[in-house]
Amino acid sequence: MIKVKCTLFKVFGMFTRRGDTGETDLASRVRVGKDSPIVEVQGVIDELNAFIGQALVLTKWEDIRKDLFKIQNDLFVLGEDVSTGGKGRVVTREMIDYLEDRVNVLRKEIGKIELFVIPGGTLEATSVHIARTVSRRLERRIVFANHYTDINKNVLIYANRLSSLLFMIAMVSNKRQNVEEKIWPIHLPKDGS
């Protein structure tokens, strides 16, 4: 069982009415519009964390559960890094190294990887593929937000590696359940058949 203690925010009520005008507070206490690129990044982080939570409850494999839970916690750090401008907890090289190490371990388990895998297979793998696509959107939103504010370079590197790890997790999930990946044939005839 994994136990977590969270003391980041104290919640006084379900609503504050402070967002009723289309603005919100970042963790840095800066007030911004809800259409701010940083708020968009925060929203995609939240969405991704929910999809990873779904994948976590579906997985049968303890090593994958550990990876997914670590990612969920890392996403809170990523959000804090972005919304405080690096004045709180920050994405570190060690966090990136963990993702890279896990990609390498899982890649050895998978063996040869075809160029284009059609997402699917088990419910577990499919849920991870959905999380992977959201992580790719997160990466794009971080790049966009970086045009407006300086973002820790490790945030972008982490997001890039995260999609790679999620791809590996989806592939391993299918392999461990003896579900063969469907490969998109790159050289289809022009009529698509």
Image: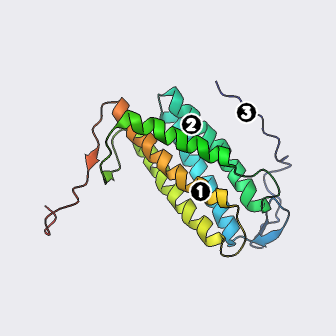
Q: Secondary structure at mark 3?
A: loop
Alpha carbons under labels 1 and 2: distance apart: 17 Å
Asked if residue 124 can be seen in this view, the reply is: no
**179 vs 51: above or below:** above
Q: Which mark is residue 4?
A: 3
Give the residue type at disc 2: Asp
In depth, the one of 62 and 43 nearer the eye is 62
Residue occupying image coordinates x 83% and y 48%: 9
Alpha carbons under labels 2 and 3: distance apart: 15 Å
Give the residue type at disc 1: Ile
- Left-right relation of 191 to 178: left
Q: Which image quadrant: the C terminus?
A: bottom left
Q: Decide which of tag 2 and tag 3 comes sooner along the chain.
A: 3
Point out the frontmost of discs 1 and 2: 1
Indicate how the structure is coloured in the image: rainbow
Q: Which residue matches tag 2?
A: 67
